[in-house]
Amino acid sequence: MTALLYSLDYHHWFMLGLLCLVLDGLTRNSLPMWLGLTALTVGLAQLLLPLAGLHTGWPAQLWMVAALLPCFLFGWWWRDLRAPRHLPAELVGRRARLDKPLRRGRGKLWLDGRRWPVTGADLPAGTEVEIQARQGLAFRVEAVENTRP
């Protein structure tokens, strides 16, 4: 199997890339598209790098690393997509418990099925807090004194 991977030439990578792109058109999954684009990139590198005097001895390893890169980029994009773009004013004045401690003045609060960024004094997890105001893209919270006997 290893000998097969090392015997692949640039035109094999181009064919694999085109096959993956066709497969992407036939399915609803975007994974074949990324694999196809990375295979085309490896084929292009294997074609052009020897012309520049560089040797590509590991095209299969290059393809594996290049195929992982879109996965990391998608994770970064998805995390950024899920970040709140605005803070609803209706949450000001509400109370909730911190599920994680506030450290160095920053933390997160779980409220109404969503995790919200909060700022305030350092507090341990489980502390009941009240949302005081919106401050940029975070809520400012303060600890609530328990008035129960």
Image: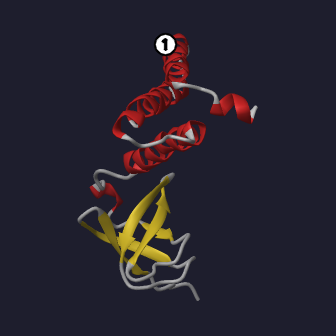
Q: Label 1, on which residue?
A: 25
Report the front residue among 13 and 64: 13
Q: Is residue 138 above or below residue 64?
A: below
- Residue 136, how many percent across, how many down? 23, 65
Q: Farthest left residue?
A: 136
SS type, badge 1 = helix
Report the front residue among 149 and 24: 24
Q: Residue at x 76, y 31 (%)?
A: 1
Q: Residue at x 59, y 42 (%)?
A: 61
Report the front residue among 143 and 147: 143
Report whether 60 appears left or right of 137.
right
Q: How is the image coloured?
A: secondary structure
- Residue 143, how many percent across, how many down? 43, 82
Q: Residue at x 43, y 45 (%)?
A: 73
Q: Farthest bottom residue?
A: 149
Which image quadrant is residue 29 in? top right
Report the front residue among 6 and 133: 6
Which image quadrant is residue 92 in? bottom left
Q: Amino acid at mark 1?
A: Gly
Q: Farthest right residue?
A: 1
Q: Residue at x 57, y 76 (%)?
A: 126
- Residue 6, how many percent across, how many down? 64, 33
Q: Quadrant of the C terminus?
A: bottom right
**How many marks are shown on the rendered structure?**
1
Count residues near mark 1 (Cα–Cα under 10 Å), then give few for <14, some for 14-19, many for 20+: few
- Residue 26, how many percent across, how many down? 54, 10
Q: Is residue 106 above or below residue 68?
A: below
